[in-house]
Image (spheres, rainbow, N blue to C red):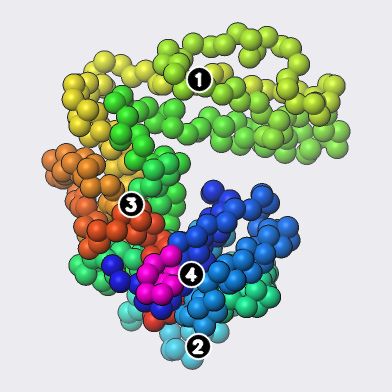
Amino acid sequence: MAVNNSSCIYIDTRDKAVHYYGSVGGRAVHDVANYNSRTLDSAFFNDFTEILVGFMRKYTPAQAANSTVILPDSVIMTDIITLPAMKSNIMRGTVESTLSGLYKNRKELRLNTFYALQNRQYSEVCICGVKELLISAVKNSCVTSRFNAQNITFAAETSARAASALNSKLKGATYLLLDIKETYTRVVYVYKGMSLGFSALPFGYSILEKPKLASEDMLFDHSVAELAVLNARERAKARAVTFIGEGIVDATQVVIPQNDENDENGEEDDDAFSGGDFADPARQPGTVYKTLPKKSARKLPKYMLRPTPSADEGVADENFRIFAKWALCYLQGNPKLESLAGAKAVYVNLPEHLNHVITAINEEHSENKYQFLPASFDTRDEFVQRNIELYGGLFVGGSRNNNVF
């Protein structure tokens, strides 16, 4: 796949890395530099500036290229508001006053809006926002390093642009995109070729390559979230009665024993709950600590169990049902998105040798009501297929929209 004269910088907070992707001498170049800071704070931007300076020394053409900074999805907010139909000159003021009422920190946010649907009765206004301070910090780092960042957007948007560039059928289409990486999955609701909503799943195609059935209970911790909510409620109740907060459990004090990956029996380790001292050296006497029991896969009654597949492909087909379940939950659980223009299908970006799982799930199309289709990207470049958020960053300059700051 040819690479134009654009370049992009992607801030990947998941792997604590900054990616450079662009064209040098007519060929695609990808470079990565890691940083140590935990959040996008002043320490991060000091590191970010140094990283950009290093990239500019190696890739001088990027200083004059049409360049884009790709932010992580986690710093972006999106929303949809419904307003009664009115004249355009009145609508602008109404939208702004509505936003000021909805978001108490409106002055701290940079918000882009566009009208996704307008008729004689009402208008659907889509909102995309980011903190103004974050935009300023990114631009300051770019100016200091002489990196000409003409556009700032986020990973879900560039993923949608890459899908349009790599599959002509997806240009201007409305669909749900499952970009399944090895260890996580990016979920993007694409509306007429533009990202309108997004989420992430903390598991990827690695569970499809293992020769054993995956249990969703073991893939990520629902119980940690539940315990955090319970602790927060108890804390709030206690503070309403007294200002003495001793003995109240904070969610940050929860100690979670780690499972042995090879332990499939789910037996509890008695040493983890013996009541002895925890490894935390900052533990204060008198503080209440709670632990979660060692996790084990949930056991369902026999009548709820599906037949155990014998072949490895059958195991992968069963494991893909977890992805399909979440995709259907996102579609059916977001009526605002679906009311604009219902998604016609779920497009799945997977390594080619795993595409058989899509065929298997479509056998239940009558029940799911949505068809699952392979992304069918027109590229033989495995790097592009596995990193579409980088590739899509090369196409931001030519078409600005609501998701570009």
Would you name the residue on which mark 3 appears?
178
- Vertical placement of residue 318 versus 134, above or below: above
Would you name the residue on which mark 1 appears?
260
Q: How crowded is mark 1: few (under 14 residues within 10 Å), some or many (20 or more)?
A: few
Residue 90 is tagged as 2
- Marks 2/3: CA distance? 39 Å
Q: What percent of the width, then of the height, locates residue 199?
A: 44, 52
Q: Residues within 10 Å of mark 4 (few under 14, many from 20)?
A: many
Precedes in sequence: disc 4 or disc 1: 4
Residue type at mark 4 is Cys
Q: Nearer the viewer, mark 2 or mark 3?
A: 3
Would you name the residue on which mark 4 appears?
8
Quarter assignment of residue 288? top right
Residue type at mark 1 is Asp
Extent of the magenta region: 22-29
Precedes in sequence: disc 1 or disc 3: 3
Viewer-proximal residue among 379 and 241 = 379
Q: What percent of the width, then of the height, locates residue 291?
A: 64, 22
Residue type at mark 2 is Ile
Precedes in sequence: disc 2 or disc 3: 2
For mark 3, give the secondary structure.
strand
Is residue 28 rendered magenta in the image? Answer: yes
Precedes in sequence: disc 1 or disc 2: 2
Q: Is residue 205 something one can see in this rendering? A: yes
Q: Which of marks 1 and 2 is in front?
A: 1
Viewer-proximal residue among 179 and 65 = 65
Viewer-proximal residue among 275 and 102 = 275
Q: Nearer the viewer, mark 4 or mark 1?
A: 4
